[in-house]
Amino acid sequence: MDQQQTPLYDRLVLHAGKKPVSLHVPGHKYGLLFSGEERSFFRDIARIDATELSGLDDLHEPEGVIKEAETLLAGAYGAEKSFFLVNGSTVGNLAMILGAVNEGDTVFVQRNCHKSVLNGLQLAKARPVFLGPEIDKTWGVAGGVSLQTVEEAFARYPYCRAMIFTYPNYYGMVYELHEIIEFAHDREIPVLIDEAHGAHFSAGGMFPRSALELGADAVVQSAHKTLPAMTMGSYLHVNERYRFYERLKHYLTLLQSSSPSYPIMASLDLARFYLAQIDRDFINMIIESFLEFETKLMKIEEIRLINNDSNLFLRDPLKLIVQSALGISGFQLQQALETHAIYPELADELNVLFVLPLAPIKNSETIVQTLARIFAKAINGTRRQIDENIVFDVSKPYSTLACSYQEMMNMSQVSVPFHRAVGEVSAEAVIPYPP
Ligand SMILES: Cc1ncc(COP(=O)(O)O)c(C=O)c1O
């Protein structure tokens, strides 16, 4: 398979080159109707914002360039079949779960998952068994699930029909997924993975092993998070053991727009091409630049960085977790950074999270100097003491819903003060950020 090709992107460029007369949607008419300042922002991208015209194929029944692009995608990731998604990993998780899970099925799910996973389970009318993650105390972050937890839950719920895990977590932490997948497969249970933050893992080298490589049956990835793809551009891959292909396709058609964005799809084609270009030399350049960046940061007294060796979980090198050595909260650091127009991915009580580019870092010296100044000045603040027993209830390795999703829909709701909510059934999801 020639991974140098970008069939969908090329066809769009060819189409734009014809200077087409648009007597079709979208209404901006290849950008002609943008007239003010916005024209400079939208002009170029609007030239490839086409629709399902002859030669441009159809995402929902691909037979031409989209099919070619998706075949290249599957080849690049070593999947049996791969899909472009235009509504993020959100739609990928929904379709992956609805495809594999039947009403009333018992499904193991990692507790610290994205809301789309919970929404998928609710739509599928599943019976979730929530598996508690291991907690990394240094960073105050919930990581992955242990094999022991899976085994304990399985001893109690041996009729489990599917397992859903998040790998890596938002902070790029990975865990021993391989042995969990083996455990599940030995019992003929499919394993579905939300790998939203790991679309780049298959580059190899210093990156953790990808869930597909570890044998997962279906994997969802946000190409837009770590690869050069447009926001909402994601991938969904399935292996032959994922026996629900036709149902999955059906749900993708149901859940995705009938007018999928061509710029997003073209960027997915280009992101796969970008990943396929990455060779050992390029990875070495990335590693060197990351090491240089981290070494410089570690010299700054006020900054504390995660260290792979002393940590419970291995970390994706693209994610850099930074703390203040002076006890300032992550939220306060985020504020200080943003006043200098430096925008981290997220903050929590302890940390700020930087997502580095899948490329050597340019002008790292300037960034380090700016960070040094900001961290040195940000000394007026304190972290709140986190009561770990409340935030991370590790007393139960697994738990279930107090009543089924269907029962919940028919119950009436009351508002109570937060402290009185303990022991009640939550009427709506309270989703902390990061999700
Ligand atoms: C673990 C995880 N899964 C799924 C999603 C949803 O991804 P998307 O934004 O591509 O819809 C997110 C978004 O942050 C996420 O963090």
Image: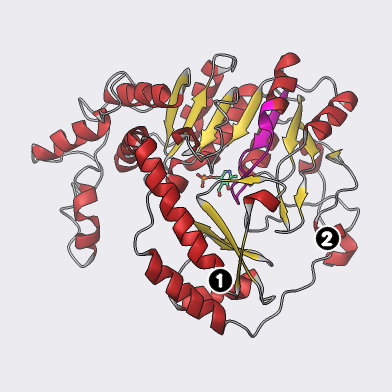
Position of 11 relative to 323 (above/below): above
Decide whether residue 371 is among the magenta residues.
no
**Left or right: 5 as drawn, with respect to 271:** left
Q: Is the residue marked by circle 2 packed among few (<14), some (14-19), or many (20+) residues within 10 Å? A: few
Which of 349/376 is in front? 376
* Residue appearing at x 47%, y 67% in the figure: 343
Dividing the picture into quarters, in which one does residue 375 lie?
A: bottom right
Left of 19 or right of it: where is 36? right
Residue 15: percent from left, percent from top = 15, 35
Question: For this view, does 425 lie left or right of residue 48?
Answer: right
For residue 388, which numbered disc appears in the image?
Answer: 2
Q: Position of residue 85 (x, y in %)?
A: 44, 35
- Expressed as whole percent of the image width and height from the top left, the position of residue 202 reads 47, 33
The amino acid on which the numbered mark 2 sits, given as a three-letter code, is: Glu
Q: Which mark is residue 304?
A: none
Toward which corner of the image does residue 163 lie, by quadrant? top right
Rendered-image quadrant of the N terminus: top left
Asked whether residue 173 is drawn in magenta, I would say yes
Q: How is the image coloured?
A: secondary structure
Q: Is residue 171 in view?
A: yes
Q: Quick one: label 2 or label 1, which is nearer the N terminus?
A: 1
Mark 2 lies on a secondary structure that is helix
Residue closer to the observer: 226 or 267? 226
Amino acid type of the residue that numbered disc 1 sits on in the rendered structure: Gln
Q: Which residue in the protein does label 1 denote? A: 334
What distance separates the C-alpha of mark 2 from that of mark 1? 22 Å
Residue in the foreground of this view, choosing between 66 and 276:
276
Q: Is residue 313 left or right of residue 269?
A: right
Range shown magenta: 161-178
